Amino acid sequence: MAVSLSSSFHGSWAKSFAPCEERAMLAAAFAPSRIRLARPARSSPKMGNVNEGKGLFAPIVIFVRNIIGRKRFNQLRGKAIALHSQVITEFCKTIGADSKQRQGLIRLAKKNGEKLGFLA
């Protein structure tokens, strides 16, 4: 049993293409003039708080920093962080936690401080 496939194409393939000049013009019209491969944007590593200006206490922290000045504010913040680290260390000594657990608690305190806006 022979199956015949009907087609609307009548003629040869050679006749269906435009002459060389027209093909070149069409190719030039539809081809991009310059192909540019996009590189992924690499941001430079940035030190600092990813939650800058966010958090519950951020407005208060920024207000105090603007009043007393950045240098004095950073000195006070450094003292507060050192004092908090000492409290965590004493707590770890009391409960018998090792230095790895203590370091984990200090990192957790830093993350929480960033989220709450203390490091704004």
Image (spheres, rainbow, N blue to C red):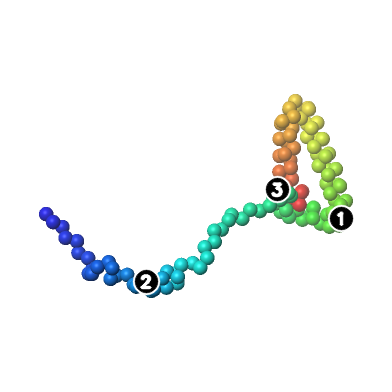
Q: Position of residue 82 (x, y in %)?
A: 83, 39
Position of residue 96 in the picture relative to residue 4 (left or right): right
Where, by quadrant of the figure, is residue 6 drawn? Answer: bottom left
Q: Is any part of residue 47 visible from this angle?
A: yes
Q: Position of residue 35 (x, y in %)?
A: 52, 63
Sooner in the amino-acid sequence: mark 1 or mark 2:
2
Amino acid, disc 1: Gly
Amino acid carrying mark 2 in the image: Cys
- Quarter the N terminus occupies: bottom left
Residue lying at 42% horizontally and 73% vertically, measured from the top left? 25
Residue indicated by mark 3: 115
Q: CA distance from mark 1 to mark 2?
A: 74 Å
SS of the residue under disc 1: loop
Closer-to-camera residue (106/18): 18
**Label 2 sits on residue:** 20
Task: Work out whether mark 3 precedes mark 2 in sequence or the reverse, and give the earlier one.
Answer: 2
